[in-house]
Image (cartoon, rainbow, N blue to C red):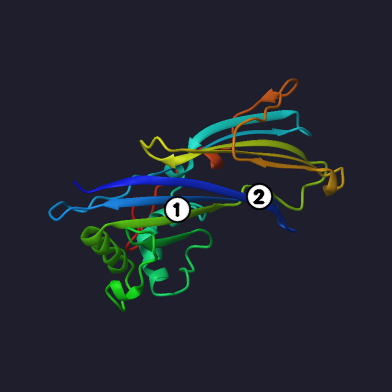
Amino acid sequence: MPSWTLEKLSARFSPLNTTANFGHNFHANYLMKYSTDAFGKFVETPKLDWHEKVIKAELNDGEWHEYELNMYTLKPNSKTLEIWSRRYIEAYLKAFGRPTSPAVLKGSSTLLDKSGMPVPGTRLEKNLSDGGKQADAVRSYLKRYGGILSIEVHDIPSISLPLQANRHTERLLIFNVGVENGALRQQAEQYLNVDANTPQANWTQHFALNWAKSWSSRGLRKVQAPGNLTTPVAPVWKSGECW
């Protein structure tokens, strides 16, 4: 029976320091193997599970809030996560050496054969411009031969700059990512402490591929997380995009 297996989930990170952002690049690479048979109907990959817990304090206001959600369920069309819904389209474009679609600013998807080698465009139907047909060409290859999708999600968790006057923000972001109903997970954490009243060289910028950091909200009053961060946004799929 045809099936998908998350064979490997790996991650890497690097500091992100620009005039617009203070934080990190976080890359999570999924190796999704498709096992096929001669008669089974093609099945879709499991849905992405991009689980985040956010604990954030605005120390200048004496307030803090927290929330914990699967961000892909919340906002699947976000620029960070839309690579998952476009996994077949972007794999098709890459096989032909064509640039990533302008719709996708971050992340990548690559079609590999069963031995882990990139599948060239010569193995796929050529000259397809519609996203739906491009996606179906990749599905058709996988259904016939089996193979691997290497999907990289590129997140840039950060605090926007410049800071407002007197702003002092402390944030702990805890990642627990994988696929829905999958046992293989990648943990990570990011801790940022930024203060408009001190030089940027004194700010804290921490990232690790585990969970270890903690801090206290003692003396602060808890408030509800802003609705724009926790309100689901219904997906709007273009041709070839899917859960």
Q: Residue furthest bottom?
A: 127
Image location (x, y in percent) of residue 43 = 24, 50
Residue 218: image location, x then y, percent: 73, 20
Which residue is farthest front? 115
Q: Residue furthest right?
A: 198
Q: Nearer the viewer, mark 1 or mark 2?
A: 2
Residue drawn where x is 77% and y is 48% of the image: 163
Give the amino acid at mark 1.
Asn
Circle 2: residue type: His
Q: Which mark is residue 192?
A: none
Q: Residue at x 33, y 51 (%)?
A: 33
Alpha-carbon span between mark 1 and mark 2 = 21 Å
**Which residue is disc 1 drawn over?**
77
Secondary structure under tag 1 reads loop
* Residue 153 percent across, percent down from the top left: 50, 53
Q: Which residue is mark 2?
A: 24
Residue 81 location (% of width, % of height): 47, 52
